[in-house]
Amino acid sequence: MAKEEKEMFQNKGQRYVTKGVMDSLPVEFQALCWNLIDQNVQKQLPLDYLQIFEFSTEKGNQKLVHRQEEPEERKEYLISPKLCLKSVSQKIWVIDSGEYQTMLLPEEY
């Protein structure tokens, strides 16, 4: 009998953001990360317990790479400078422990 895998990021009521993320990532980008995860859940895509968001600037635009390792998935987004309060270069992790979800900086792990 195959081991039943728990679907990731189902418990939206238990979400936390660390102080490091609060201090370095605008709340609009935090909301964008949660929203991208929720869209993938809604589409019933298989999600890894670790979601990686990499913010950078490219040719004056804010760039966001959203990726995971298992199954391997990578999507890139360009955000118009008109929608950004400030440009950000930052890597963010979102981890689903099963009981709760935490948005953190890799160095806070």
Image (tube, rainbow, N blue to C red):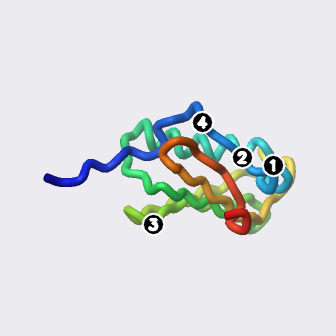
Q: CA distance from mark 4 to mark 2?
A: 10 Å
Q: Quadrant of residue 72?
A: bottom left
Residue at the (38%, 47%) spot, across then down: 45
Q: Quadrant of residue 15?
A: top right
Residue that numbered label 4 is attached to: 14
- Between discs 4 and 1, the one toward the N terminus: 4
Residue that numbered label 1 is attached to: 22
Q: Mark 1: few, some, or many residues within 10 Å (few <14, many ≥20)?
A: some
Q: CA distance from mark 1 to mark 2?
A: 7 Å
Q: CA distance from mark 2 to mark 3?
A: 22 Å
Q: CA distance from mark 4 to mark 1?
A: 17 Å
Q: Which mark is nearer the camera, 4 or 1?
A: 4
- Give SS at disc 3: loop
Q: Are marks 1 and 2 in contact (CB under 8 Å)?
A: yes
- Between discs 3 and 4, the one toward the N terminus: 4
Q: Mark 3: few, some, or many residues within 10 Å (few <14, many ≥20)?
A: few
Residue 27 can be seen in this image = yes
Q: Which mark is nearer the camera, 3 or 4?
A: 4
Q: Residue 86: x and y, percent? A: 86, 53
- Between discs 2 and 3, the one toward the N terminus: 2
Q: CA distance from mark 1 to mark 3?
A: 25 Å
- Mark drawn on residue 17: 2
65 in relation to 43, above or below: below
Residue 81 can be seen in this image = no
49, 98: nearer the viewer: 98
Q: CA distance from mark 3 to mark 4?
A: 23 Å
Q: Residue 56: x and y, percent? A: 73, 65
- Give SS at disc 1: helix
45 in relation to 24, above or below: above
- Mark drawn on residue 34: none
